[in-house]
């Protein structure tokens, strides 16, 4: 994306920085979630992730401007950091969600049923964590495809960035509705 929009810049020299930052801050997302709650950290990560792509659009080159590679890359680094924090917080939420749901189902059925529910919750959480990791890896395929489709349909990357922001807003709403708001189905 950077090489296409800013042909004078060799992005391959620094392309690793975004994923590296995301990986480095992931434990911080988990740590913050242990203190503030996974849903709250995930919620605010999605806020940042929804804003960053839209905020990057003005930094793209246009007919009236050469754009700003520094501004564009900084916003994407912010996006990567928010994604890393959100990854850590989501991985904190998943076990809590499954444990809570299974414990609710076993309520009033005795200690043995409660213990079995906890084991079932751990098993389901582990499977979901593995599945969510596989889905996240799909992003490495889907995101470039979205950029390509945006270029093919509109001649630029802007619509892909808008689509990503809308997707993150939908994730934000889901997180708020079921996990983060007062009276949520499974507060975590």
Image (spheres, helix red, strand yellow):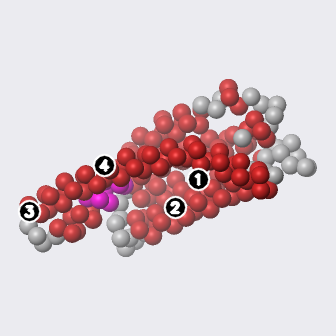
Q: Which residue is mark 2?
A: 171
The label on residue 126 is 4
Chain part drawn in magenta: 93-99
Location of the N terminus by quadrant is: top right
Query: Which mark sits nearer the N-terminus, 1 or 2?
Result: 1
The label on residue 49 is 1
Q: Is residue 185 above or below residue 41?
A: below
Q: Secondary structure at mark 1?
A: helix
Give the residue displayed 71% in from the left and 31% down from the top. Answer: 11
Q: Which residue is mark 3?
A: 111
Query: Which mark sits nearer the N-terminus, 3 or 2?
Result: 3
Between the residue at mark 4 and the residue at mark 1, the CA separation in whole angstroms equals 26 Å
Query: Which mark sits nearer the N-terminus, 4 or 1?
Result: 1
Please identify, in this view, whether the residue under mark 4 or under mark 3 is nearer the observer: 4
Please identify, in this view, whether the residue under mark 4 or under mark 1 is nearer the observer: 4
Between the residue at mark 4 and the residue at mark 2, the CA separation in whole angstroms equals 21 Å
Between the residue at mark 1 and the residue at mark 2, the CA separation in whole angstroms equals 10 Å
The reply to whether residue 57 is visible in this rendering is: no
Q: Secondary structure at mark 4?
A: helix
Q: Secondary structure at mark 3?
A: helix
* CB-based contact (under 8 Å), mark 1 and mark 2: yes
Between the residue at mark 4 and the residue at mark 3, the CA separation in whole angstroms equals 23 Å
Location of the C terminus by quadrant is: bottom left
- The x, y position of residue 47, in whole percent, is 56, 58
Number of marks drawn = 4
Towards the viewer: 73 or 143: 143
* Left or right: where 58 falls relative to 166: right
The answer to if 98 sits in the magenta stretch is yes
Towards the viewer: 46 or 8: 8
């Amino acid at each position: 994306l950077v090489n296409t929009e800013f042909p004078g810049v060799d992005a391959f020299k620094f392309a690793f920085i975004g994923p590296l930052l995301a990986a480095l801050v992931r434990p911080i997302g988990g740590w913050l979630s242990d203190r503030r709650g996974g849903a709250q950290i995930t919620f605010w990560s999605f806020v940042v992730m929804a804003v960053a792509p839209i905020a990057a659009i003005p930094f793209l080159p246009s007919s009236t401007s050469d754009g700003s590679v520094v501004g564009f890359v900084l916003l994407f680094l912010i996006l990567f950091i928010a994604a890393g924090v959100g990854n850590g917080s989501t991985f904190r939420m998943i076990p809590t969600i499954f444990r809570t749901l299974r414990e609710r189902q076993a309520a009033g059925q005795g200690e043995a049923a409660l213990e079995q529910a906890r084991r079932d919750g751990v098993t389901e959480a582990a499977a979901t964590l593995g599945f969510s990791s596989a889905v996240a890896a799909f992003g490495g395929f889907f995101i470039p495809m979205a950029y390509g489709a945006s270029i093919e349909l509109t001649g630029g990357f802007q619509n892909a960035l808008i689509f990503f922001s809308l997707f993150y807003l939908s994730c934000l709403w889901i997180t708020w509705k079921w996990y983060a708001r007062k009276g949520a189905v499974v507060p975590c």
